[in-house]
Amino acid sequence: MFPQRIISVSDLSDDQIGEVITCAKKFEKTLSGKQPLPRVLEGKVIATLFFQPSTRTRLSFEAAALKLGGEVLSMENAEINSSTAKGESIEDTVMTVGQYTDLIIIRHYDQESVAKAALVSPKPIINAGDGTGEHPTQALLDLYTIKKRLGRMNNFKIGIVGDLKNGRTTHSLIKLLARFEKVDFTFISPAGLTVPDWLRQELDSKNIPFREVTNLAKYLSELDVLYMTRIQQEYMDKDEYQKYQSVYCLDQVGVKQMKESAIVMHPLPRVDEITRSVDLDPRAAYFDQVRSGLCVRMALLKLILDR
Ligand code: NCD
C-alpha cells in the first residue's frame, strides 16, 4: 500500500518514487490534451492546514484535488485563524480536522509539530514544510522536473546554492538525490549557512561524497543542474539576514557561462537570487517546476487516496 504519512522523502521506497513520477507524467499529458482528467477524488475532501505562508504548495495541492474531482477545506494563517490562537495543541487540531476530511496537508514553522500531528492523525497526512526540516513533495517535483528536462535521474552534476542550513527544500532534495547513482553534489553557501549536522551525518553514513564551497561563479560552467534558493530570512535576526542577503545572484552573464544542456532551478519564491532577465533563457526551469508541482501533487493525492 502507498504510504499514508509522507513526512520525509525517506517515507517512500524507490518503487513508490517511480510510481509518483509515472503517474505525474500521465497527468501532465492529460492536462495538455483534450481528454478529461479522471475524477478519482470524487467524494473526498482534503484539508490544507498552513501555519506558514505559501503560494505554490497550498494552491497546487488544492488545484490538484479540485481537478481530480475532490473538494478542499483550506486554513491559511492557521496560527491566527485556528484555535491554535486559543492555545489548542496541534494534536487536538489534527484530530478534529481528521473528522471532517480524508487527507491533511500541513505546513508548520516548527519541525516537531508536524511530526506530532502525524503521530495522532486519524487520516493520511502530508508534510508541506516543517520549519527548517523537510519539504518532501517539493523534492519529488524537483526530481520529476530533472527527469523531464535532463532525461535522467542519475549521472549529473548539481550545485545547490543558498541557505543550506535552514532551507528545507534543499534538505529533502539532497536526501532524495543521494539515492540515485552518480549524482555529484556541490553545496554552495556562506560558511555560516552550510548543511546541518543531521544531514551531513546521513550523507557520511551512506558514503555519499559532496564538496562544500562558497563561490558560485567558479562552478557554473561544469554543472548540469543549478538549484538556487533564497536566504531564509524568517529563521534569522536582522543582522544575520543583512550579512547574507544578496550573497548569490544569477544574472544573464552567469547563465551564459553554463552548459547549453544545463538547467536552472529554484523552488520559489525568489527574492534576488535570479534576475528576471534569466527567465527568458531556455535553461530557466523554475516555472516548469511550478507546473510539475501540480502534476506531482495530483499523483500523490491519487496514489494515497484512490485505493
Ligand atoms: C519553499 C518553502 O516553503 O520551503 N517554497 C515552496 O514551497 N516552493 C522555499 C522557500 O520558502 O524558500
Image (cartoon, rainbow, N blue to C red):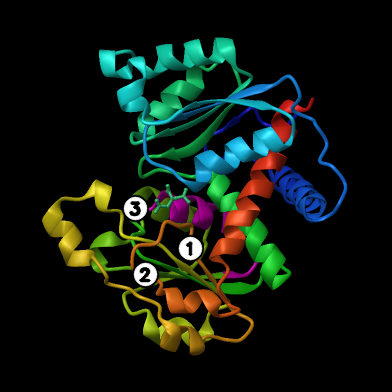
What x and y, as percent, mark residue 149? 68, 69
Q: Give the quadrant of the C terminus.
A: top right
Q: Are marks 1 and 3 in contact (CB under 8 Å)?
A: no
| Mark sitting on residue 273 | 2
Q: Is residue 276 above or below residue 253?
A: above
Residue 190 inside the magenta-drawn segment: no
Q: CA distance from mark 2 to mark 1?
A: 9 Å
Question: Residue sitting at 45 percent across and 79 percent down?
Answer: 277
Disc 2: residue Cβ within 8 A of ligand 1's nearest atom: no
In the displayed structure image, the side of residue 81 where residue 299 appears, left or right: right
SS for dot 2: loop
Q: Amino acid at mark 3?
A: Pro
| Mark sitting on residue 196 | 3
What x and y, as percent, mark residue 156? 62, 73
Query: Crowding near pointer 2: few (<14 within 10 Å), some, many (20+)?
Result: many
Q: Amino acid at mark 2?
A: Glu
> Which stretch appears magenta?
167-183
In the displayed structure image, the side of residue 191 where residue 220 appears, left or right: right
Residue 178 inside the magenta-drawn segment: yes
Residue 62 placement: quadrant: top right
Residue located beneath label 1 in the image: 266
Q: Are marks 2 and 1 in contact (CB under 8 Å)?
A: yes
Residue 126 placement: quadrant: top right
Q: Earlier in the sequence, mark 1 or mark 3?
A: 3
